[in-house]
Amino acid sequence: QVQLMESGGGLVQPGGSVTLSCAASGRDLMLYSLAWYRQAGGKQRELVASIAGDGMREYADALKGRITISRDIRSATENTLDLRIDILEPEDTGDYYCKAKLPILNLEYWGKGALVTVSG
C-alpha cells in the first residue's frame, strides 16, 4: 500500500510558475515509479512527467522546456515528488494527480489531486 498526498496549486496568473509537491509513503518506494498526471475539464488524464526508481525521467513532449520534476528520497518508505511548471498558460488549468506504479505487478496508486487554475 502506498499513500500519496498532493499539495500546492491554486490560482496562478498566466506567465507565472507553480510548484506541486507529492508526499509518498509506503514500503519499498524505490521499486515504484512516481509520476504527475493532469486532467483538464472534459479531457483524458495525461502524463506530465515521471521519475522511475532508478532516476530515469520521462516528460510529456508538449511540456518539455517548461517543467521540472524532482524526487527526494528521504528514506525507503518516504519520498517526495515535486513538479514545477513555468510560463503557465490557461491551458495548464486542471487537476494534477500524483501516481505511484509498481511495474513488476502493474500496481498503481493515485492521490486525490490538486487543482491548478491559470487565470488573469
Image (tube, helix red, strand yellow):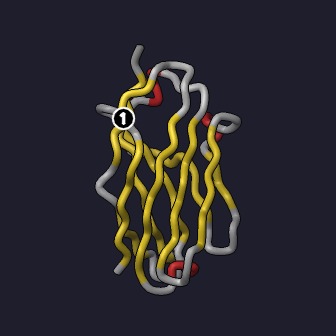
Q: Quadrant of residue 117?
A: top left
Q: Residue at x 51, y 58 (%)?
A: 35
Look at the numbered disc 1 and give the secondary structure of its residue. strand
In the picture, the quarter occupied by the C terminus is: top left
- Between 111 and 79, the residue placed more toward the observer is 79
Please tell me whether residue 15 is drawn above or below residue 69 in the rendered image: above
Q: Residue at x 52, y 75 (%)?
A: 32
Q: Residue furthest top?
A: 120
Please tell me whether residue 92 is drawn above or below residue 67 in the rendered image: above
Q: Please provide percent x and percent y for residue 15.
A: 56, 20
Left or right, residue 35 beside residue 86: left
- Between 68 and 59, the residue placed more toward the observer is 68
Left or right, residue 19 beside residue 70: left
Q: Please provide percent x and percent y for residue 38.
A: 42, 43
Res. 2 in view: yes
Res. 44 in view: no
Residue type at numbered disc 1: Gly
Q: Please provide percent x and percent y for residue 74.
A: 56, 75
Q: Please provide percent x and percent y for residue 89.
A: 51, 22
Q: Residue at x 62, y 74 (%)?
A: 53
Number of labels in the image equals: 1
Q: Within 10 Å of the Cα at label 1, are there few (<14), some (14-19), or many (20+) other Cα atoms?
A: few
Q: Which residue is mark 1?
A: 10
Please tell me whether residue 114 is drawn above or below residue 80 in the rendered image: above
- Between 118 and 32, the residue placed more toward the observer is 118
Q: Residue at x 64, y 46 (%)?
A: 68
Q: Residue furthest front?
A: 74
In the picture, the quarter occupied by the N terminus is: bottom left
